[in-house]
Image (cartoon, rainbow, N blue to C red):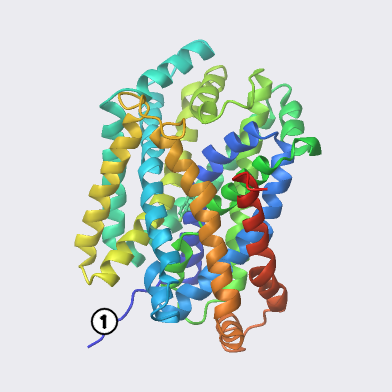
Amino acid sequence: MKQQRATFNSKLGLVMASVGSAIGLGNIWRFPCEAGEHGGGAFLIVYIFCVMILGLSVMLAEFFLGRASQKDAVGAFKVLAPCSMWKIAGYNGVVAAFCIVGFYSVVSGWTLEYIYQSATGNLNAGSVEEFTENFKNFTSDAFRPVLWVFIFMLITHFIVLLGVKKGIEQTSKLMMPLLFVILIILCVRSLMLPNSIEGLKFFFKPDFSKITSGVILSALGQAFFSVSVGMGCMITYASYFNKSINMPTTAVSVVALDTLVAILAGIVIFPAVTSFNISPSQGPTLVFVTLPNIFQQMPFGNLWSLIFFVLLAIAALTSIISLHEVVTAYLHEQYKMSRNKAATIVSLSGFAIGIICSLSFGVLSHIKIFGVIIFDLLDFITANLMLPLGGMFICIFVGWFINKKFLKDELTNNGTIKFRLFYVFFILIKYIAPIIIALVCINQLGLF
Ligand code: PFF
């Protein structure tokens, strides 16, 4: 007998799971640091364009692929285009997921250390220099961060093992509302700081002269990373959608909530940064050095730090689960392995890459590829190359090789729901998205 495929239990559950995948370190850690490094308001404008136009279209194309095929990221291409090379787009996704798990688990592990330190009242260094020093000492240590990676991977492993309904759906349904509440509390706190208006200006007031091709590529990569597209994550999740789900509205909800959280994170971070006269362009340390330092200067500092890092850990957890699920579903379905075995392989090998990424801040910091450490290399290659290119191939595949009527029927649930902007979506994925992505990538590689 053919085994019944897992599905999400409720509409709310599947939206929360997809939102949980999208909202993560990408919104709260990566987005402010990219925006800070690339000119604040200018980056925000390009980012919003990329996420609303390109991110949304690729997400809907992925939803289509997943639900129509009822397969994992590679299986979807095999079913919809048998005996073709398109499955390479699926492999690109599985490899990207695997690499992201590697560096993502490291930053997720850091959040646990900071939770521990705030809970035990030890996160009080004194000056920014001391905070920076402590952060560097911690991240370059050979054992402690690796231990936290291990713990984080272990938690992820058990949630994935619990399966789609009990593990992924339940965790996301519980965690996502909690995350919103914490974020709103932090926003209010940040806006009450003196001089917070300067931070808001930096974040919202665009200086168009700062928009370069590098800024556009970073915004594009960040948009794809943030809404979890370009690598089959949404293909995998959509394969668990039932046939009555309205995919266009689900995609809009996921992208809108994700963007809202990124903007809220900016509202927490930039006013706090300018209020304490710190440069917003600190890079990856912005959240781990600047924020605890700022919290420390406020009443109940450790409590604010604790709340913030719990928020970050929750966001990280629901995202890493989805990355893990991409590879687990692939191994489970393509190699007919039990879910248990597939998840164990992914957890162990993800942990191995996590160790290498973590050590690249310390004992392996001398290994530089293209001038950067392994952690930064994986971050750059996945977000700025594999996801945009993956997204481009997904658009070309759906726009050019899928029968248009089949696409429309699937996206309108056989005509039972309305999708008025179908033709706009179709032109976007057929022409506009692939051309823009190709131009940005070619330009960035310096080919013209
Ligand atoms: N969207 C997640 C974040 O913003 O942190 C990261 C991510 C998850 C990227 C899943 C890609 C993915 F497939």
Q: Which three-letter amino acid code belongs to the residue tagged 1?
A: Gln
Give percent across and percent down for residue 203.
Answer: 71, 35
| In the depicted structure, whether residue 172 falls above or below residue 315 | below
Visible in this render: residue 72?
no
Direction from residue 357 to residue 299 in the image, left or right: right
Considering depth in this image, is 383 or 193 the residue closer to the camera? 383
Quarter occupied by residue 49: bottom right
Visible in this render: residue 302?
yes
- Residue at 64% across / 60% down in the picture? 54
Quarter occupied by residue 191: top right
Q: Residue furthest front?
A: 447
Give percent across and percent down for residue 446.
Answer: 63, 44
Direction from residue 156 to residue 434 in the image, left or right: right
- Residue at 58% across / 86% down in the picture? 409
- Residue at 54% across / 73% down in the picture? 397
Direction from residue 124 to residue 109 in the image, left or right: left
**Within-10-Å neighbours for mark 1: few <14, some 14–19, many 20+:** few
| In the depicted structure, whether residue 237 falls above or below residue 22 | below
Query: Could you tell me which secondary element the residue under label 1 belongs to?
Result: loop
* Disc 1: which residue: 3
| In the depicted structure, whether residue 204 falls above or below residue 412 | above
Give percent across and percent down for residue 298.
Answer: 57, 20
| In the depicted structure, whether residue 47 falls above or below residue 119 | below
